[in-house]
């Protein structure tokens, strides 16, 4: 863990400390380095925390389904309005609407279920090197600082270890790859609250899931003129986990069409257990440079 990483994780945990401003209404802030619009992972993680605050302890999140409506204004706070749709014997459902200046910018359905034993099976974890033998993310930025300023200057609360070359390095070698494999964990210790671990994983899930769309075509952020924006994002949490332990985020893209691309991902523990599944659709537009 780097000192910078530790500081960035503290910033993320501050982002997850929502202010209770009314009956089932919570206010989130923008803190630290920000881009031109609210990072999707921030909206996901803050919405998870807001929904979870209205559900009793011991009933974990098992699924979220989110849609991004407008780009968030990083100069304004965000209000998360919760509708309690169901509180059953084993299930609870919440609708979260994120608003700024009277406009809806994001909506998310969150489902909670008591964790009980039942049938179990899962796909196998991909065969990749373990994170302790892989370089930290910062090593991959060396020599690319000018092209990747947005990534270099971004908040980095997640320790990320690529098991394959990232897109900008593959661009130089001419390699095309229809999948990406990245080990991830919080860049420091997290509190024991299980909801926080889910929220931090939710934050991380918006970082590399669309990469396989562009690496399938031999493209890269920073090298090629690409416009990308998340349209919708879903996650299913299969079993309890700690996200200050390593998890492999294995992603691929089954399809791109109609100026949109689909990215899918799976989080595996070091022991090979499937922890969570992700599906994200993004707007992807490529503007080739004239030769």
Image: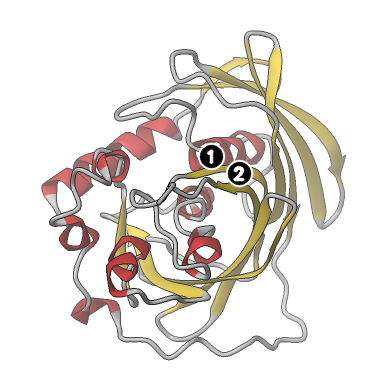
Q: Residue at x 20, y 56 (%)?
A: 141
Q: Is residue 234 visible?
A: no
- Asked whether, in this view, residue 255 is left or right of residue 14, the answer is right
Secondary structure beneath disc 2?
strand
Within 10 Å of disc 2 (Cα), the crowding (few <14, some 14-19, many 20+) is many
Q: Residue at x 61, y 33 (%)?
A: 50
* Image location of residue 242, percent across then percent down: 43, 64
63 and 67: which is toward the camera = 67
Quarter occupied by residue 151 = top left
97 and 59: which is toward the camera = 97
| Residue at numbered disc 1 | 40
Quarter of the picture holding the N terminus:
bottom left
- Number of numbered discs overlaid on the protein picture: 2
Secondary structure beneath disc 1?
helix
- Asked whether, in this view, residue 6 is left or right of residue 56, the answer is left
Nearer the viewer's eye, disc 2 or disc 1? 2
Q: Is residue 268 visible?
A: yes
For the residues marked 2 and 1, what is the alpha-carbon distance in whole angstroms? 7 Å
Q: Residue at x 20, y 81 (%)?
A: 133
| Residue at numbered disc 2 | 230
- Asked whether, in this view, residue 9 is left or right of residue 65, the answer is left
Task: Check if mark 2's residue and mark 1's residue have beta carbons within 8 Å.
Answer: yes
- Asked whether, in this view, residue 115 is left or right of residue 169, the answer is right
Quarter occupied by residue 170 = bottom left
Quarter occupied by residue 189 = bottom left
């Amino acid at each position: 863990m780097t000192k910078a990483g530790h500081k960035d994780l503290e910033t993320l945990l501050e982002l997850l400390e929502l202010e209770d401003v009314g009956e089932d209404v919570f206010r989130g802030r923008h803190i630290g380095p920000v881009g031109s619009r609210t990072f999707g992972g921030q909206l996901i993680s803050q919405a998870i925390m807001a929904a979870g605050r209205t559900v009793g302890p011991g009933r974990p999140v098992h699924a979220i389904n989110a849609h991004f409506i407008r780009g968030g204004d990083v100069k304004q706070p965000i209000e998360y309005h919760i509708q309690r749709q169901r509180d059953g014997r084993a299930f609870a459902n919440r609708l979260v609407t994120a608003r700024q200046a009277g406009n809806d910018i994001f909506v998310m359905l969150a489902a909670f279920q008591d964790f009980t034993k039942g049938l179990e099976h899962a796909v196998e974890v991909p065969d990749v090197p373990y994170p302790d033998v892989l370089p930290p993310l910062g090593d991959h930025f060396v020599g690319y600082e000018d092209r990747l300023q947005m990534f270099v200057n971004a908040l980095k609360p997640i320790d990320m270890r690529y098991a394959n070359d990232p897109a900008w390095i593959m661009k130089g070698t001419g390699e095309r790859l229809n999948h990406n494999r990245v080990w991830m964990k919080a860049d420091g210790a997290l509190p024991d609250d299980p909801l926080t671990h889910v929220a931090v994983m939710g934050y991380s899930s918006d970082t590399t899931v669309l990469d396989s769309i562009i690496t399938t075509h031999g493209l890269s952020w920073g090298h090629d003129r690409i416009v990308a924006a998340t349209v919708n994002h879903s996650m299913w949490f299969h079993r309890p986990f700690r996200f200050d332990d390593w998890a492999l985020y294995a992603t691929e893209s089954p399809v791109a069409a109609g100026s949109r691309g689909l990215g899918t991902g799976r989080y595996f523990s070091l022991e090979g257990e499937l922890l969570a599944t992700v599906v994200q659709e993004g707007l992807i537009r490529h503007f080739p440079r004239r030769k």
